[in-house]
Image (cartoon, helix red, strand yellow):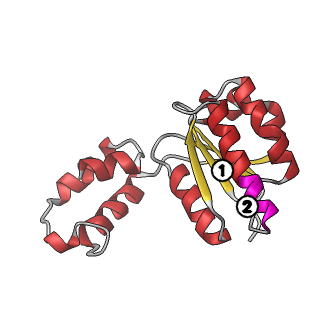
Amino acid sequence: GRLGSIILSGPPGTGKTTLAHLLAIETGSELRTLSAVSSGVKDVREVLAWATDIIASGGTRPLLFIDEIHRFSKSQQDALLPDVEAGIVSLIGATTSNPHFAVNGALLSRSQLFQLESLKPEDIRCLLQRALTDHERGLGQYNPRVDESAIEYLSSASEGDARRALSAL
């Protein structure tokens, strides 16, 4: 039920955001999400204050997911450090860049780094087949008919990006 801070690195569509949500469910932790593209130090401080309140009231350490963490400036990344070190929040950072160049060394040293890889065409094919037959979350309720050649094309044209393949489907 406890999770340290982690950095998820990999190409788009490899499941970084999905993993963050699954980790929150698995640990029973509340999850707050920030996008480094549209958030600033003020947003970070607000989330860290929220996390401090949860810890002070005896709650489980919350998770802070920062998408595109490599887009945060050094000062924005530095604002995270005291609360990450104190265990107030578990940081989950996602980046498509090389984290050794794009993420503050102090944050990296306090995090586990996971490198995600693009999906193989056969993995994408399986994902698409499941989306076509799943009645609850996929397209199964519509009984779609898709040529196998179209599935093959999408599997290779998506270049390992599950999100791109599902959007195209």
Q: Does residue 42 appear anywhere in the picture? A: yes
Helix, strand or loop status at disc 1 = strand
Q: Main secondary structure of the magenta part?
A: helix
| Most foreground residue, 143 or 38 | 38
Q: Where, by quadrant of the figure, is residue 44 drawn?
A: top right
Helix, strand or loop status at disc 2 = helix
What residue does disc 2 label? Answer: 54
Q: Horizontal placement of 147 versus 61: left or right?
A: left
Q: Residues within 10 Å of mark 2 (few under 14, many from 20)?
A: some
Task: Tell whether position 105 is magenta.
Answer: no
Position of 75 relative to 149 (above/below) = above
Using the numbered discs, state the Cα–Cα distance from disc 2 to disc 1 in whole angstroms: 13 Å
| Most foreground residue, 48 or 72 | 48
Q: Amino acid at mark 2?
A: Ile
Which residue is found at the position 66% from the left and 65% from the top?
Answer: 29
Q: Which residues are magenta?
A: 51-57
Q: Which mark is residue 5?
A: none
Q: Horizontal placement of 106 versus 45: left or right?
A: right
Which residue is found at the position 63% from the left and 62% from the top?
Answer: 30
**Which image quarter holds the N terminus?**
bottom right
